[in-house]
Image (tube, grey):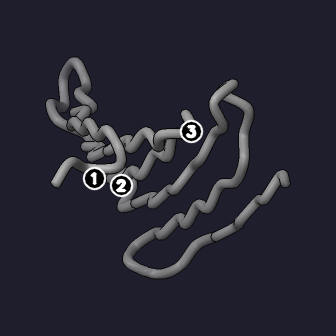
Amino acid sequence: MKAMRRRYSGTIVSRHDTKGERGIEYFSVSVAPNGHRTLQATCEIYDQEVSKDIVYTVDDQWRPVDCYTRLQKNGGLFRRWMVSLR
């Protein structure tokens, strides 16, 4: 059976010139048959003890559809929000 969406993913490592690795981001993008794209990402900044989870969707013209973001600091909830533009 063929998948309904195209998918790709990756990892971005954040480095400091003298301190080495500061953080990391894991992301994936799925592309629906109608052209909508959804990004899912988890980011961690080690020295700040901050993590972020995000789900962000754009339409086939790259216009924002909706977004959910959650920030955590020191393991506890710092802030979260959701925006729907349709």
Q: Is residue 53 above or below residue 24?
A: below
Horizontally, residue 82 falls left or right of residue 1, namely right
Q: Position of residue 69 (x, y in %)?
A: 59, 60
- Of the numbered discs in the image, which one, if any, rests on residue 42? 2
Alpha carbons under labels 1 and 3: distance apart: 38 Å
Q: Amino acid at mark 3?
A: Asn
Residue type, mark 2 in image: Thr
Q: Nearer the viewer, mark 1 or mark 2?
A: 2
**At 27% across and 46% down in the image, what residue appears?**
26
- Report the side of 81 relative to 52 (left or right): right
Of labels 1 and 3, earlier in sequence is 3
Residue 56 image label: none
In this rendering, the label closer to the viewer, 1 or 3: 3
Which residue lies most toward the top here?
17
**Nearer to us in this view, 3 or 10:** 3
Residue visible at 40% across and 60% down in the picture: 51
Give the image location of residue 23, x and y in percent.
26, 43
Q: Specify which label sits upstream in the sequence, 2 or 3.
A: 3
Query: Quick one: 6 or 44, which is closer to the camera?
Result: 6
Residue 34 badge: 3
Q: Position of residue 12 (x, y in %)?
A: 25, 32
Q: Secondary structure at mark 3?
A: loop
Q: Which residue is mark 1?
A: 46
Determine whether label 1 and label 2 are within 8 Å by CB: no
The vertical placement of 61 against 80, above or below, is above
Q: Residues within 10 Å of mark 1 (few under 14, many from 20)?
A: some
> Can residue 12 be seen at all in this image of the molecule?
yes
> What amino acid is at disc 1?
Tyr
Residue at 19% over, 31% down:
19
